[in-house]
Amino acid sequence: MKRFLTLLVTAALPAMAADKPNLVILLSDDHSQADCSLYGDPSIPVPNMEKLAAEGMKLTRCFVASPSCAPSRAAMLTGLMPARNGAEDNHSKPKPGTHSLIEDLKKAGYETAAFGKVAHYKHNPLYGFDHVGPERAPDLAAAVNRYLEGRSSGKPLCVFVGSHDPHVPWPAKTTFAPESMKLPPHWIDTPATRRQRALYAQSVKHLDGLIGRLRKVTAEKLGDNTLFMHSSDHGAQWPFGKWNLYDYGTRVPLVVAWPGEIAPGSTSDAMVSWVDLVPTLLEAGGGTVPEKIDGKSFLPVLLGKAQSHREKIFTTHSGDRNMNVYPIRALRTGEWKLIHNLRPDLAFTTHSDVLRGGKAVSYWDQWDEAAQNDPKAKALVKRYHVRPEFELYQVSVDPWELENKIDAPEHAERVAEMKKELAEWMKSQGDTGRIFGKPRPADQPETWREVPKKGAAKEEEAEE
């Protein structure tokens, strides 16, 4: 009888594996949701992303936990917000002993693999993947294809693929005309800005090509029962994007297709967070989502069984070494967002305005020149560098967060409630608002243009 039961269970394993979907997750690097045709910018066409959405669901309100690479990816892979997992500032890792959700996927019967920049550079092995492919490759789809061709496991597969596009450095040449680029309303329109926007668009085009190639490879090798997800780790390296808690820095694309399960051409405005991504994959694969994490599955939304997921989104930013030393926290609802700049006495700076040129960006000199004569340009540059302690935006009608309503008397009660809730959430997270790096005082603008010691800039950009 014992031998019979063993044979029975063994015979059932292939069928059980066949019932579980393969999971393919493609992550882009530095791509704001607004920067593509799928989400409203016709000057940056993404036909492969649009095809993915036509075959599945486009989610319009997906937000990362933190708008810099390492904290965002650590939050995704642990299901914990940055203060809880320990990866708060950029380049950091979760504290020792932090549980990886990849282990839960393995417990659910999955073979797991990572290609490209999934966690942060050199961090992929820390999360327990069964297979870690190259972190940099000319064509990640080809690398995944070679792996699938040599794979002999009968387990269902969960593979994460992390593209470098559209992170800087952007391509040296572009097929896009600078004059055709659509610019956000809170930028200064200069020739250099448009030229670099066209280069950025080319990088998005490269990303879109990877989506098409990876979908073709995985469809051929893994079959129809495959859930394909695409998202980005945070917003683009443009002013008020990456390193910021404005929507341009935290609101990212999220498109998911799963034949026979997700209705083709569907759209959802349910609010979801990046800490929810892997719990959703776990539920889709029949696994168990750990208790006491910040993430929770939004699978019912994908399957059309629920219309909403979160009522509130919390986001955090703690800095990026000495280039960006500016801790920020935010609370967002469907209609309002409160931003708390924890240290308004500091100057907000990033790789872009400090390094300028090289592998970063070169339009900042023109922004400064414009600010010398144009009051509107001067106000924009000042807004970038010097910020009030609190900001309040009615994001439902002000998507670019242009009108700060923090001092409006009619919103005093709302502000007080949101301040209290954000402070209590920080306390529950063990979030002390710690400063990382050497700050630049807001009253010393000349320090904004300090150049790092020789060799430091190269290191900062290469690993960012």
Image (tube, helix red, strand yellow):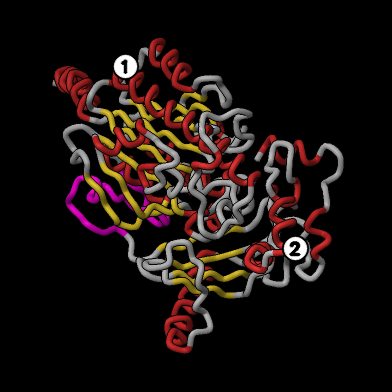
Pick the residue in front: 421 or 388.
388
Image coordinates of residue 110 in percent, x first then y, are 35, 29
Residue 56 location, quadrant: top left
Residue 432 appears at what percent x and percent y?
Answer: 62, 67
The residue pinned by badge 1 equals 221
Residue 299 counted in the magenta span? yes
Callout 1, which amino acid? Lys
Within 10 angstroms of label 2, few (less than 14), some, or many (20 or more) residues?
few
| Residue 393, above or below 168 | below
The answer for how far apart the CA atoms under marks 2 and 1 are is 58 Å
Residue closer to the observer: 87 or 168: 168
The answer to whether 381 appears left or right of 127 in the picture is right
Residue 140 colored in magenta in the image: no
Element type at marker 2? helix
Q: Which portion, as a residue range, is magenta?
A: 288-309
In this image, 308 relative to 113: left or right?
left
Question: In front: 294, or 202?
Answer: 202
Q: Which residue in the protein does label 2 denote?
A: 372
Along the line of sight, the residue nearer the viewer: 362 or 406: 362
Give, as a three-letter code, the residue at label 2.
Answer: Gln
Mark 2 or mark 1, which has the lower sequence index?
A: 1
Where residue 286 appears, x then y in whole percent?
26, 38
On the image, which quarter does residue 294 sit in? Answer: bottom left
In the displayed structure, would residue 116 be above or below residue 66?
Answer: above
